[in-house]
Image (spheres, rainbow, N blue to C red):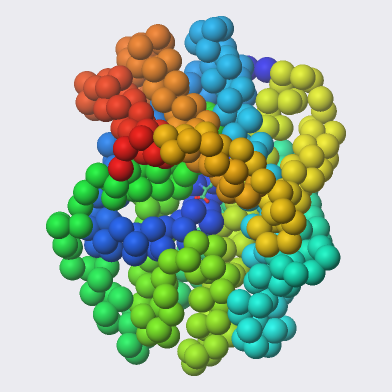
Amino acid sequence: MEKGRGQWASNIGFILAAAGSAVGLGNIWKFPRVAFENGGSAFLLVYIVIVILIGATVMITEFAVGRNAHKNGVGAVRDINKKFSFIGGLGILTGFIILSYYSHVGGWVVKYCVAYLTGAGAVYEDPTNFFLVDVLGMGTSFPIQGAIIYPLIFIGLTAFIVIRGVSDGIEKLNKIMMPSLFVILFILFIRGITIEGGAEGLGYLLKPDFSKVNGSMILAALGQAFFSLSLGMGIMCTYGSYLNKEENLVRNTFTICGLDTLVAFLAGFAMIPIAFATNIEVGQGAGFAFISLAGAFQSMPLGTVFGFLFYVLLFFAALTSSISLLEGTVAFITEEWHWDRKKACIVLPVIMFLIGILYTSSQACLDIKGIWLDANGISYPIFADFMEYLTDKLIMPLCALLYCILVGWIWGVDKASDEISSQGLYAFKLKGVYGILVKFVAPAAIILIMLSGLGFIG
Ligand code: PFF
């Protein structure tokens, strides 16, 4: 192991940090909406199966690659096979692009926290206007708050934590924020399941309707699981690289996947009934959390308090994820390019923040487009969508696919299993199943996600 490399001070610190990475905007902002749109309870069941079979497989694979080498995403892959180090590079690139926009959405969340702390008057007056004009700058010269001030605060906080290093910064923050996140989520969950008029929403999530299971729903669950579990970006590989050899990777992986799924479900059970009770539409992309729900809190008793809690919850979730994204790139730059940590933690966030300005301002204020090619031909999506397409539909699944091929077919299931079992310290009873999953099932599923994302199927 390289001298001076960070290490988790405890196994629970690692679990909370990896769960902190996984639990993010994807769980709270996106999952309830995707679950609702894809059949509610039936989606929940399919999602669980996918997390167990595919999500846990790819996650443990990333952990094993990282811990085997005790190196960053590129170095760890290079240790297995030099020709594959580009996979590590692809992962770092994805994390870099994602954080460029994730930090801006995180900034909007901070703006909502401030708005609710001060009574939410401006939000309640006109939630749509608040989001589109005040945050995204529609019709104004430039969204200074949504594209500059608040994203700067958010990415500044991210950098502030990551600069302190793995155990003093990332681990300590997660040890405080993750338990707090669970407490807040639990309060909102209780509110959701007891709210008057929410029973129909609850029923929708509880009564399985298997006629809703179809190809496009399964693919939606697969895509959601990948993003939610922070897979395909070398982030879990980097976090795994700070873990010592004696810890039990199988148990840790199931714990982390379980926590991530639990949060997503609790968020669904909190928000869908609230949406039914207040008669708002679930769906509408970003608008669900930032417009519909933002306005809905007004009509609930103590709504502003619950609203504030909701945005604080989103903030905690987003921050613990964004620090993992930054750490992935910082680990690479400090170990491969030999920058010092401080410099990396200042220069990288500045570049990401600048790119993110295009993300926010392209949504309603400036006409900035990207270019996209898929089964439907060439299109020119707004820059914000272009960034998400690039990562979600292309690089992220590609990277996860290559990881599985590398480990399943090149490194080999035996060597991967030696790492997973801590060289035999723990019995890895699922080795046979893992081999089949990593060599065949996960790659096939990922190829399907890619084909569906690019419009060839589904
Ligand atoms: N898993 C995070 C979420 O659900 O919001 C997003 C994310 C974080 C994706 C870190 C990828 C990553 F490496």
75 relative position to 144: left or right: left
Q: In terms of depth relative to the viewer, which is nearer, 140 or 27?
A: 140
Q: How many marks?
A: 0
**Residue at screen point 34% across, 89% down:** 196
Along the line of sight, which residue is nearer the eye, 33 or 360? Answer: 360
Residue 329: image quadrant is: top right
Residue 255, horizontal then vertical, whole percent:
38, 45
Residue 37 screen position, x and y as percent: 34, 62
Above or below, 366 against 416 in this view is below
Residue 307 found in image quarter:
bottom right
The N terminus, quarter of image: top right
Q: Is residue 361 visible?
A: yes
Q: Which residue appears farthest toward the front when viewing the image?
A: 377
- Residue 289 pos. (x, y %): 53, 69
Residue placed at 54% from the left, 68% from the top? 287
- Which residue is located at x 50 percent, y 69 percent? 288
Residue 447 in the image: state x and y as whole percent. Answer: 36, 29
Quadrant in which the C terminus is drawn = top left
Q: Is residue 169 visible?
A: no
Identify the residue at horizontal 50%, vertical 18% (top origin): 68
